[in-house]
Amino acid sequence: MSFFNNPGFLWFALGGIIPILIHLLNRQRYRRVRWAAMEFLQAALRKTQRRVRLENLLLLLVRVLVMVLLALALARPFFRRAPLEALGDTDTHHIFVVDVSASMGYRPARDTPLDVARRAAERVLSEIRSGEQDRFSLVTLSSFPEILMKGRTQKDQIRKALGELKPTDYGTRVPAAMAEVRALLEDPDLRNRDRRVYLFTDLQRVGWESSDEAEARKFASLLKQLSGREDTTFYLFDAGERGEPVNRAAVDLRVDPPVVIARRRARFTALVHNFSALSFPALEVTFSVDGAAQPVRTVPLPPHATVPVFFDHEFVESGPHWVSVSLDPDPLEADNRRHLALEVRTALRGLVVDGDPGESPRQSETYTFVLALDPTREGTTFSVDSKGVELFDAEGLDAYDFVVLANIPGLSADKIERLERYVRRGGGLFLTLGARVDRVSFNESFWQGGRGLSPAALEEVAGAAPAGTDGREERRIARFEARHPVFRTFRDKLRAALSELVFYRYYRVRDFDAGAVLASFDDPAGSPLLLEKAFGEGKVLLFTSTLDHEWNAGIAGHPPYLPLMWNLCGHLAARPPGRWNLLVGDLIQADLPVEQYQPPFLLYTPGERGAVHLAAAPPEPDRKFFRVSYPLRRRTEDPGVLRNEGVEWAGPYRLTRRPPGEEEKTVAYFAVNLPPRTPAPEEIQAAEGNLDRISPEELRRRFPDFKVEFLGDRREGTAEMDLKTPPGSNLARHLLFLLLGLLLVESVLAWWFGREKR
Amino acid sequence: MAENARSYLDPRILDKITRLDLKARHLVEGFVAGMHKSPYHGFSVEFAEHREYVPGDDLKHLDWKVFGRTDRLYVKEYELETNLRSHILLDTSESMEYGSGRISKLELACLVAASMAHLILRQQDSVGVVCFDKEVRQQVPPSSSMGHLKSVLGVLAQAAPRNRTDIAAVFHALAEGIRHRSLVLVISDLFDRPEEVLKALRHFRHRRHDVIVFHVLDEYELTFPFQRMTLFEGLEEQPRLLVDPRALRKAYLEEIGRFCGMIQRECVRQSIDYVRVTTDQPLDVVLSRYLAGRLSMRKR
């Protein structure tokens, strides 16, 4: 199949009638001669007529052909496939797509798939017989594809860039890379030419498949659209290792409790997954805290199994820390480590606002609650500030890890607004109810038709008469979310303990999500006792009864009360792990208190970049926080090329500040890991450490409309590659040579035929 | 005669005659001055009788045949013919109209005729002229008087090219019509069927006439120098041809060369004098060369 780069010039082919017109015109311009020797002339004509006619026809034909060839050459026709090797001249946009995901760093032997891909790409580059009009682009294939070069004229530029490619810590997402390829194919500066897309990848299955059917259909459609274009040819080189992959990965690292208190034991749990069919009877796992290695643990790791490894630690100092786990080296190093950044607290600070202070402190709504949290009043685990609702101004809430509003009649709109801002920024709010709560006011302030802080709207109070009345009906907790951190103490053997807590009265609620209910009563309606709502980055828990004994049988005096409230407050105090614990490609962003605004800020990165200065704009006067971010979206010299936003390398990142005249201080740690974000089985299987491949045959079956030619592959044990480079063919140059030849032929013929006439 | 008188009185004709006369005279005197004898001898002298040889007789008149038979020497005596009878046959067909330069073939032919008439009359021989195309158009019988020249010149001056050519038919008729051995001067371009023309010339020879062929051609007919696209309009009812002359030139020259060569070779074979006269050559040089050549042949 062929077509033209400049089809408009084909109209010039009509110039082929010019020689015919000139020939006809010449025949109209003659002189007249009265001639006597006509017989001799006739005899001569009879002898030469045929020859003369042939000569004239030949010359005319050559001249017409010259005009037509000129038009064709200007129109620049080309074939997608050169009929002859000798015609392998190109006017082509060559797009090299090279997989740089973490799996391309898999090194079972000497070469990684990226080494193999690079060599194959260089070989293709060498074998391309490029013309002056050829253009070269380079795209990286990963979960964050980048156009490294666009429309370059020199092969050497691509060659150099290929040489500098290294495996990243990114995952593999072929659809994302193809979207970038589409942008290049549709680039208006690079149109009117043949396109060849050379894909060099290890054919990792997770990059080609998606569990979302809609996404999978969209991807198949994109492949069909791109490869089905007349002017585009796809080639694929399989750089993957064909043997059985051997890989283990640290897929998760978390701490319990979520909020770690200094000088209290914290348990770290690492999950190690075996992606291979091999068994590792004694896998060495090493934890380290702030870079200091801890004693090695050895665990057996069966094939395709996920095994937990535990590590207990007490932090002496509060402040930012990081913990990491690393495995024995294997062919894919990138996923052998997992990091966790955490803020170790001296104690969790809470503000308790008491709506029913009573006549004495012991009679207050929150007396037993506060006592449960901080029995010694030393603030060792919880440091609690209490105040009556009249004194509560909702200012300075960010100093607290959680806020409790216990049985309060109502709050003004501005206080509600400040509460909402606090929770939205990550704060925890615990709402408890009682006789002081006005249902209407509560619904107006906290429910707001579902937009407010409360996970539910209040209805009537249910339950028996106040305490002391005989015949009141007892309600116990019938159901609770055992997996929720609030109830972590009550799993397994202690499951039944919560049933000790007896309630008499509670608010019925409505308009709540069933998933918001963490615990419910044994009444016929299964009324909720505890509900949760996520609000911005924070959370709100609604307790539908009282904290004190007014509506219950003195739950504060029962053993489950204390762990329940500790868990609850600890849960409220826990900030989203995503602020400090990220995946590769995420943006590091920290909102820091204005008191910490002491530039310069340095971010120590695990990659080659080393320490990076971070710019931070001075905080605005009425703001209590300022933000630092890393990295920014970088513009390159080429306006069409942008580099990724998001961190590129996994590992610990340390943010420091340097107060004037003081030593450098660590502000925070950020831990950046490879996926998965959670240890769910489907996420583990979708991780980059899963080196399962999709074969070319399966690729064809799965994407039957994806027109791709396989350039070659990596043979086991050999460095040979069966590589066929496809020549395209731009005929313009050849047509011009032919044209020159024809002009020469025309000159020679005209001279030769005219020689006899002279 | 009346016609002649009328044409004679026409000033244009008179002028032409005068000019022709002057030219021819000039030509003839130019080469006669170098000649002591006439190139044309009484080859029409008749044998009279034998007489015995006496010392002093010209040995060339000895009859060797008789000596062979009789062993006795006898000389031949001849009856001297008083006049060389000449007939100038002038082709006035339309083809003779062509002339690429100053002079047409007919004008040149007339000049040749006038010159030869002058020469012949000068040596007191008789000359007549026949103008022909496809048939005889005008004829003046031979006469040797100088006043006859005017008649001859008059005919020549009035000769106008017209009609097609049929040389063979005319010559055959003339060959039969001329009774006595004569000198026949053919002045023509001979553009007719060559085999028939040659046959007709052979007829003259068969009738024991002495023939000279003045083959009159135009320079362009021999060189064909045309370059541009040309529409050749044929004379003598020939068709028109629009051709690129450069494409035909070589073939045309071959044809015309073959024709002239054939005529010349056959003339030589038939002992016919062949003189090619072209419009680009000085006539006096052509004639003097020819006549000088003929004189030297007589000496051998």
Image (cartoon, grey):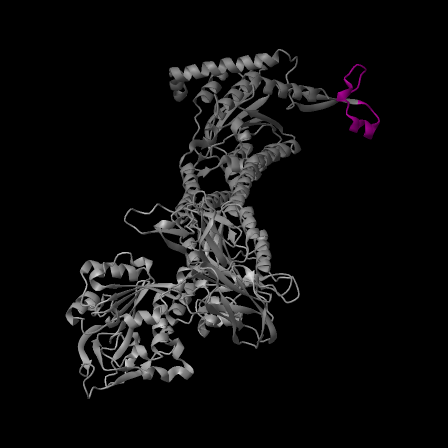
Vertical relation: A301 (above or below) B275? below
| Side of B250 relative to A29 (left or right) | right
Q: Where is residue B189 in the image (x, y as percent from the top left)?
A: 53, 30
Q: Quadrant of the N terminus of chain B?
A: top left
Image quadrant where residue B222 sits: top right
Q: Does the magenta stretch include residue A65?
A: no
Q: Residue at x 57, y 35 (%)?
A: A755
Q: Between A61 and A30, which is closer to the camera in this rendering? A: A61
Q: Position of residue A319 (x, y in %)?
A: 44, 58
Toward the left, the furthest residue is A440
Vertical relation: A130 (above or below) B37? below
Q: Between A609 and A523, which is closer to the camera in this rendering? A: A523
Q: Does the magenta stretch include residue B65?
A: yes
Toward the right, the furthest residue is B71
Q: Position of residue A687 (x, y in %)?
A: 48, 68
Q: Between A157 and A569, which is closer to the camera in this rendering? A: A569
Q: Between B135 and A356, which is closer to the camera in this rendering? A: A356
**Number of marks present in the image shown:** 0
Toward the top, the furthest residue is B33
Q: Can residue A190 be seen in this view?
A: yes
Toward the front, the furthest residue is A360
Q: Can residue A46 be seen in this view?
A: no
- What segment is highlighted magenta in the picture? B52-73
| Side of B227 relative to B39 (left or right) | left
Image quadrant where residue B73 sits: top right
Q: In which quarter of the image is the C terminus of chain B?
A: top right
Q: Where is residue A115 in the image (x, y as percent from the top left)?
A: 59, 58
